[in-house]
Image (cartoon, rainbow, N blue to C red):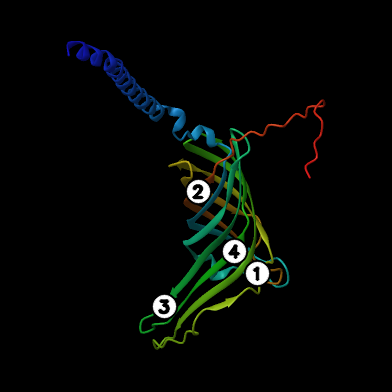
Amino acid sequence: MKQLAVLTLLIFSPFVNHAQISTGKVEDAKKKSAAESDKAAKDPSKKYNPDAGLMDFTVFIGAGYSIGSHRIEPNGDLFGRPVGTRADEKMVNRWTYQAGVRNRINRYLSIEAGLSIDRYGESYEFKSTVQDNDSVYSYDRKYNMLALPVQLYFTYGKRVQFLAGAGIQPYIPLSMKTKTTIVDSAGTNISPEGEARTIEGLNSAGINLLFSAGVQYRFSKYVSAYLIPSYSLGLTNIYGKQEPHKEWLNALNIRFGVALHFPESTKTRTKKVKDPNKKKVFEW
């Protein structure tokens, strides 16, 4: 009986030792894999790096608050007449809208091209100062332009980008709306109904100079926000040749919006080298 017990112990002892060694190896493997995963999580190369996205394709959309000014003078042709009360006009600030693309050419230069709805406004009001005379004459005029701004920026920074540049802005007029208010001396409102909308009398096209400076902040790999005020200097008279006056429109447009980034591809193509000694096999 004693010999049988010894024999049994000798038979099962290798399995017990193997199980202990195996258990130890499993624990070591688990610890190793956990350490590797922690190391990978802390690896900065796995996180978003804004330095790697300088040449991304970028699309932006936004709005702007336009603070306008203008210059008016008589038309020197046969149709011209003095500026008169138009010299007392006040500019009306209006909202504008823009969309386009803004990409870097290299580390320090970016180019922007887009489409914008530029809007200007001007108003005039006269109230009688004579006693027992309540006459009022006023108007509010709005200009809407479709513009194609193109600018070249000096660009500095990565996650936070500072931009300053200049460009040109060709435009075509979309409409001119005028709302007129007339109250006679008896206090009766004899104003025409609604707004008078027309495109007649406006020049068919024009061009402005643009000067811009601002900042863009990149929140993530795909999204940025920007604030880039732009000053437009009118080079073209907005009126036609037969109008009584000439007018040039200027504006400080405080532009802001969101930019979406489409990251550049990091894949590299490898060209397969053909082995000249390899026989071509046809597959039927």
124 up-or-down from 29: above or below: below
Within 10 angstroms of label 1, few (less than 14), some, or many (20 or more) residues? Answer: many
Viewer-closest of 60 and 184: 60
Residue 218 coordinates in the image, percent (x, y): 46, 41
Q: Which of marks 4 and 2 is nearer the N terminus?
A: 4
Q: Mark 3 points at which residue?
A: 128
Is 238 on the left-hand or right-hand side of 33? right
What amino acid is labelled 1 in the image?
Answer: Leu
Viewer-closest of 79 and 33: 33
Outermost residue, front side: 1
Residue 59 coordinates in the image, percent (x, y): 55, 50
What amino acid is labelled 4 in the image?
Answer: Met
Residue 24 coordinates in the image, percent (x, y): 30, 19
Disc 4 vs disc 2: which is toward the camera? Answer: 2
Q: In which quarter of the image is residue 133?
A: bottom left
Q: Name the residue under label 4.
A: 145
What amino acid is labelled 2 in the image?
Answer: Ala
Q: Distance between the residues labelled 1 and 4?
A: 11 Å
Q: Which quadrant would the N terminus be assigned to in this image?
A: top left
Name the disc covering residue 259, or none: 2
